[in-house]
Image: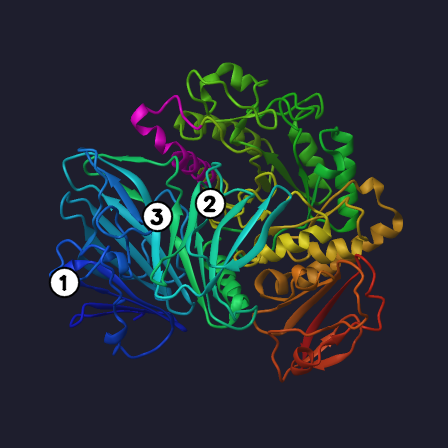
Amino acid sequence: MAITFYEKNRLFKLDTPNASYLFAVGEGNYLLHVYYGAYFPDTAIAPMVFRSDYASFSPDAAGAPEAHFSLDVSMAEVSGNGVGDYRLSTVVLRYPDGTDATDLRYVSHRILPGKPALEALPHIYLQSEEDADTLEITMQDPATGVKFLLYYTVFRNLDVMVRSLRVVNDTDKTVWIEKAHSLCCDFPENNFDLIHLYGKWAKERSVQRLPLMQGIQSAASKRGASSHFHNPFLCLARKETGEENGECFGFNLIYSGNFSADAEADGYGGTRVSVGINPVDFGWQLLPGDSFQAPECVMVYSAEGLGAMSRTFHRLYRKHLIRGAWQYRKRPLLLNSWEGCYFRFDEEKILQLAKDAKELGMEMLVLDDGWFGHRDDDTTSLGDWFVNEKKLKGGLAPLVKKINDLGLQFGIWFEPEMISPDSELYRAHPDWCVQIRGREKSLGRNQYVIDMTRADVRDNLFMQMKQVLDSCPIAYVKWDFNRNLTEPASLALPPERQKEFFHRFILGTYELQERLLQEYPDLLLENCAGGGGRFDAGMLYYSPQIWCSDNTDPIERLSIQFGTSLCYPPSSMGAHVSTSRRTGYDTKAAVALWGTFGYELDTAELSDEEKEIVKQQVAFYHQTYDTIHNGDLYRLIAPEDNGFTCAWNFVSEDKKSALLTVVIMRRREFQTLIVRLRGLQADALYRCSATGQTYTGAFLMGAGINFSDSDMNSDGKSAVLYFEQID
């Protein structure tokens, strides 16, 4: 059993293979955090239970008989508001009398086999009930009677816990939730580095690592999406922690809307991590008998550096978040029309792309933006999801049949959450646009946002998409989202529920994607949001891959993909060889192989020599697919490590194969370049497919591969070496 309750001292001990997490029911039935860190088997931990600091300005806890017990200096498992803990609150409720003091006391608990599913929210699921156990703790505010359910799912074979919170209004009065974070995690010290992922459009998820400072540090979004600018991931790392050594704690919210991930270093030397829905612009009216479920947050512990933390996240998400037909099925190698055509195409052009794609060994042709309404640029037609027959005479069906007859699958682009002012749908339903009555609406990329909180809107979108998807065999949908939300309100919501808008919006998006997948279970869905503006664990529940960034330059992609991989598996990263001319096609493919791999270019511009190169790349993709998509990633040299070289390797789960990639970002100051692999079986023999040379795993990890005398010292050069075990 991964969860143990010790009745004598009212102590909970939650154990993963390499971590222990402890908390206890303390004075006044407050739930007090004890320990999170390396696993230990014993329970003789009384001396470490409570932080003993006390300050005269920290009030005694109400209802606690022991003098000088203060919530303000205690480590909490969940934190209320206005009752003595002045640090970050987990939950804030406003009551009918206008007050917002929220007090949470332990009432009872249950230990459950397996894990309950969440309704209407993406969540971690189990392959078997044996994978994990779940602790459910019931808390209650003694003054109001409102209940709070805390959930802890503890994995038996991964160093993972999954946390969430449910607020239950069992009273006869309406209450309003003003904040409902998914977890609170306290640490007795604050000597950490804080790592988070920041960026902007075309430069998403860069890694920032800074010493944790006194006060509150926050990564957050209030844009209506998790955003290009911050990601719902943060990590606390010990000062000495590196890629393959040292202790770290990773936190990732399974949510695609407004979030905040906060770390507070307090005046007593402690740290509090609090992660959940951003309380800014959030509120939820909870009627008597209603409940509110907060999103899940994943916690990962590693005593072997950031690399081990990442690989744990990757395994968890590949096996317990991504789901459906494409969880393990090999995904098709595609050619996307966007960078090759933009809006300028007709049936003849698309068919030629398909013929070229087939000749080059690709498996799918994706028709991107511009196929619908009267769309010739980005000013029109979003919301009019019917074929532009001026471009595609006779509609999609004849075109798709010709493409299928070539032996290719067909995919298509939608942007369901958006609506153009110049569209039939907007002219018929101007009230379906996200807006505040009486306030001028903001345009972004010449488009408005459609109101996903409304069931009638979602029904309309679903039926339009269904007509397209039923008209011909469509195997893949790219779902885009190209602007953030402004004037965030719905004309269909009453005033007292307008603060629910942002959360209801993302729930509506989830509902429509789920509906689509239930109707078309074999559909491969790829999410996109102006590139990587909604690259988060919430979206991975619906789509096994997400377009990583609109920036397809291979050198720029290095930092984007390295940062993304801190939390998200390489198999989820949409990555293409594109028209960028900064490097040759060898390096473009070397970087794109990291992710889903595909092409996004005009095949008519390829020379005969380049076509032969592409054919070789396609063959190599198939050879290495399983090693990359189902293997473990080891980041060897990060882009920021020296500014010259970047390197990584994949190792298959059974250690039978490995793929090493080295990229020269710019010419090195010194000639010497030795790259040592990681993760191999030390006593096994590996043959390099490119050279025929054999090495032991120990040699490759110790002595490494010496590139010093090669031509690997020019801007944009790369090397990709594939190794297979031999008997």
Rendered location of residue 360, percent (x, y): 78, 49
- Give yes or no for residue 551 being in the magenta stretch: no
Which label belongs to residue 67? 1
Furthest residue toward bottom: 683
List the residue tagged with mark 3. Answer: 181
Q: How many marks?
A: 3
Is residue 530 visible in the rendered image? The answer is yes
Eye-nearest disc, 2 or 1 = 1
Structural distance between the alpha carbons of marks 2 and 3: 13 Å
Residue type, label 2: Ala
Rendered location of residue 540, percent (x, y): 50, 49
Rendered location of residue 583, percent (x, y): 80, 52
Dot 1 or dot 3: first in sequence order is 1
The range drawn in magenta is: 488-514
Furthest residue toward right: 608
**In this rendering, is residue 381 above or below 541?**
above
Rendered location of residue 548, percent (x, y): 61, 48
Structural distance between the alpha carbons of marks 1 and 3: 30 Å
Is residue 329 visible in the rendered image? The answer is no
In the image, taking residue 157 as reference, residue 35 lies left or right, namely left
> Circles 1 and 3: CB distance less than 8 Å?
no
Eye-nearest disc, 1 or 3 = 1
Residue type, label 1: Ala
Which residue appears at 65% of the width and 62% of the height? Answer: 638
List the residue tagged with mark 2. Answer: 220
Which residue appears at 75% of the width and 40% of the height? Answer: 354
In the image, taking residue 598 as reference, residue 526 lies left or right, namely left
- Give yes or no for residue 490 being in the magenta stretch: yes
